[in-house]
Amino acid sequence: MDAPDSDPHGFKRRGVLFVLSSPSGAGKSTIARALLADEPELGMSVSYTTRPPRPGEVDGVDYHFVDLETFREMVANHEFLEWAHVFGHRYGTPKAQVWSVLEQGRDILFDIDWQGAQQLHQLAGGDVVRVFILPPSMAILRQRLIDRRTDTMEVIEARMDRAANEVSHWDGYDYVLVNDNVQRCFECVKTILAAERLKRSRQTGIIGFIRKLIR
């Protein structure tokens, strides 16, 4: 992933840890894929997980699939920025390269839940931008989960119970969007990312420009 060149003045900037969260089925993964395809300066944080791969998932691309013993060793060695236990499986974000990527002005996309977003914010503070995506209604969310045909009804009911809990943490995010139209929601997410990249606190190279400007 090359260093960003979207600023016409060439100001160096610090990267963004861009978090997308939502209840399962609310459209987060669809928007994340579209964002990655549309934003060459944005890379995906590939999490480690103990769950088995789903059809079509590729190790090292969608997730790093590891056994429980390996995951526990990584936790003990403090190799994760954040990790969580979800539906009987563990998910964790590796620390490796994240800080250097930020310093180079690159951005990283995180597809994590509210617990992970909270942990990440505690560690990285102002580098983190948190976006929460809501479904139009819980009834629509349930139907989306059914239509995916990837889970049993028992798992779907568990996901619906978890969804209510996840939605209750909406106020721990910087931005909250309703995904009643995936294209419109995607455009809003893109706008948020563009604005956050231009924040004064991230424009680390602007100080030299200002000094020259007022000489």
Image (cartoon, rainbow, N blue to C red):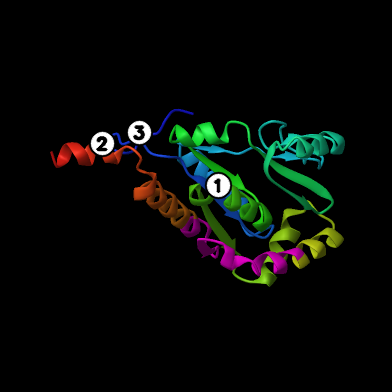
In the displayed structure, 133 sits above or below 125; it is below
* Secondary structure category for the residue under label 1: helix
Asked whether residue 176 is drawn in magenta, I would say yes
Q: Which residue is painted at 72% across and 58% down in the image?
A: 147
For the residue pair 196 and 58, the one nearer the viewer reads as 196
Q: Which residue is painted at 57% across and 52% down in the image?
A: 121
Q: Which residue is painted at 25% across and 36% down in the image?
A: 208
Q: What residue is disc 2 on? A: 208
* Secondary structure category for the residue under label 3: loop
What residue type is disc 2 on? Gly
What residue type is disc 3 on? Asp
Q: Earlier in the sequence, mark 1 or mark 3?
A: 3
What residue occupies the far top of the structure in this picture? Answer: 2
The part of the image, by quadrant, that contains residue 136 is bottom right
Q: What residue is disc 3 on? A: 5
The magenta segment is 162-185
* Secondary structure category for the residue under label 2: helix
Say left or right for 155 vs 182: right
Residue 197: image location, x then y, percent: 40, 46
What residue occupies the far left of the structure in this picture? Answer: 215
